[in-house]
Amino acid sequence: MKPSVIILSLAACAVLAADPLGIERIVVNDLIDDGENMIADSNLSSSNQTFGSKSIATLSTQANMNPYSVIAYSPSVNFTPVDQAGSNEPSYHDPIRIRGKSQSGPGGVYMIDGMPISSNPGGGKQLMDMENVSSIDLLKGYLPTDKNLGFSSLIGKVDMNLLSARSKAGTEVSQSFGSDDFMRTFVRFDSGKIGDVALFGSFSHLSNDKIKGNGDLKRLNGTVGLTYTPNNAFKAKITAIRNSDDHHNYYNLSYAEASNLGANFNKDFSTSKPTTANSVNYYDWNKQSFDTTALMGEVEYKPSANDTISLKPYYKKDTGDYWYSNGNLGSAVATNRVVNWQMDHDLYGATAAYDHEFSEALKTKIGYWYHKQLPPGPPSDQEKYTVNASGNLVFNGYAVLADNDYHVLQAPFAQLSGEINRFKYVAGLQYQSFKLGSLKSHTANSSAATSSDYDTAIATTALDPWASVEAKTFHTYIPSLYLGYTLSPQTSLYIDYSRTYGFDVNLFPTYVSNRANFVSKNVTLQQLWDKLDLELSDNIDVGVKTTVGALTLNPNLFVSFVQNKQANIYDPTYGVNYPANIGDAFGYGAEFSAYGPINEQLELLVGLSYNRYNFTQNFQSSATTTVDTDGKQLPDAPKYMAKAALSYHLGDWTLTPSARYTSSRWGDVANTQKVDAFTIVDFDMAYRMGQFMGSRNALFRLTATNLTNEKYIATINAADNALAASTTASTYQTGAPLGVYGSLNLKF
């Protein structure tokens, strides 16, 4: 079916999972009070969108643990999880693209209350229960200087605003169940305000069998929060989260397998333990288990009506294991190995800011951001195992054994903003210091006799000077600018500019895996390390925002100029292949969103987008071969996407059909591996009643996902420079089949 036909069909009838009050208006700096919460409004028009609490309840699926499931209905957002639980699979990157771009390096996309607390690889992908989130800010266009944080910001940010302790006491209980033994329980208790203090605590437990093959998903999450407000001039809050995530991975298809979904859609790992040597694809050797602890604080003091001082410290600790059979992640580890990637890392930091308002025409902000995080990435502890004739794992040394230092980012920043007649402006600037920690490799001097205890192995294994490097620091200006003009009370124009940044850490593991070849050419890692540069993207948006009745329309054009993009190239100077920051890329496209009530019974949400994102040059892949990449669409970046939702209210009932169309994609940068387009249709039915089982409010929901049982590729695990025949070859994961879910939510 042609994209134009799909788009017209979606706009006419389609749409999304429901809330008893329907789809909340998804707004840009025009938040709606849902009766319980009100989020601060920056009052700017742009392509950025804010999803409120009703939108979260509608769009977050039965799992209620992944913010990307909510923003997936925004134009240019490509997120399709591999199962109905909405789990992020695999663990080493976020499978989300925005405007064709993927996140780079060990930086996470989401933030909590403006704090960049997410990272990759590891756990904490589903750190928040969506019932504890008041709203979600999707920042994909204009990125203000105080939100341009974390190890990477290339594709934008997803900022979850925490639902702090309520001023009134209450309890919320939710129970969900459904296909593949899906079961989720959520409980939240609010103390209400007791003097100057208010407390809340929540607990959730989720379990779900895999949708194919053996294995399951188990998630435990506990959150507690305290708010202290002794007067109108001072407020403080602290939030603690403990998250446990244990789940078995899904098999990654090769392109040949993905090209025949009729035969391979349900292909997964072996369900029984092998009885012969060198058989590594057993399901229980492809799993991950992580425990994550997070602490976040916020202090705000207003010495006068025109002055505000704020401090936001944050901390996260993440430990666990990621087991996988080599080859299923495109690994360069020797064949017939099982790898245990052990992770024990933390990050911490803080932002401090001072705001002063001189007048409506001039408001100022100055601040400082500090952030420190321990790898991985790159990896430091990857153990190899062989499989013996009895089908048991035998320690075989290290794929990577290294002692890696902290990455440190810090930046003073300043911002000017104001409103002059019909004009609004915001101008900001960071001066960022981005330090990559030193890497001390011991891998080449390890063997099967090396201790499997990491600390012992590091202490007793000699340093490898060929694969070790000193710290490296980038100094970069990160500017941003927003200009808006109000044509009428219904219509405004805007243009904005933001620079975003990121860094891939692929060079170190690539060198370690191919060390013998580099040494034979007399090339040290330090020589290649010295050539690295920070990836930068300069992004411009131009758009209009207008209202017709209660319906908001937002057409938008955007363009991105990317420099120093990493690509795996052949360097004739050294005669070797390695990841280098030499690429230039160009992205551009158009978006259209429409949202709001059509009448008293109908509410609409539509998101349409066209995206182009490609390298602007060809790359040499060997001494005699050049890959034709100039102008080719990057992997897993669909040109066309269309999403729509329509809620129909009939008394206490709400009926919500939904649909998402994703056009064909490529699995490699040379555009030789094509993946077919697909459309997912869902339907949700909700019924609200009061006074049920002693509650003041009860909600029953029945949801069907993938109604047509479409067979499709959900996620392409691909580097931007992935080639069909190389160690960077992409793998493919199938999407979730038809699922049916029911839930009961009670508020007391």
Image (cartoon, helix red, strand yellow):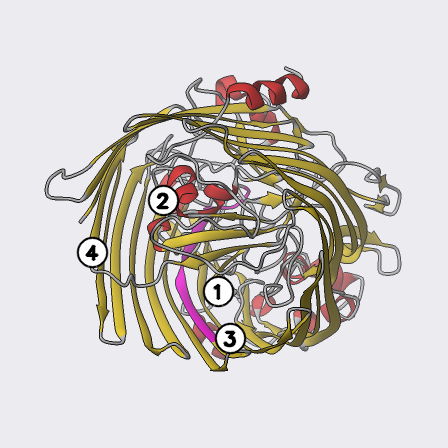
Q: Is residue 94 above or below residue 673?
A: below
- Residue at image location 45% in from the left, 48% down from the top: 32
Tell me the quarter of the image containing the N terminus: top right
The alpha-carbon separation of the residues under discs 2 and 1 comes to: 19 Å
Q: Which residue is mark 4?
A: 170
Q: Amino acid at mark 1?
A: Ile
The alpha-carbon separation of the residues under discs 2 and 3 comes to: 28 Å
Q: Amino acid at mark 3?
A: Gly
Q: Which label is found at residue 117?
A: 1
The part of the image, by quadrant, that contains residue 293 is bottom left
Considering the numbered disc 4 on the image, is that residue within a helix, a strand or a loop?
strand
The rendered magenta stretch, by its main secondary structure, is classed as: strand
Front residue (pair 491, 139): 491
- Residue at image location 29% in from the left, 26% down from the top: 651
Q: Earlier in the sequence, mark 4 or mark 2?
A: 2
Q: Is residue 692 above or below residue 401?
A: above
Q: Which residue is mark 2?
A: 64
What span is in magenta? 312-327
CB under 8 Å between discs 4 and 1: no
Percent of width and height locating residue 729: 65, 40
Q: Amino acid at mark 2?
A: Asn
Q: Which residue is mark 3?
A: 349
CB under 8 Å between discs 1 and 3: no
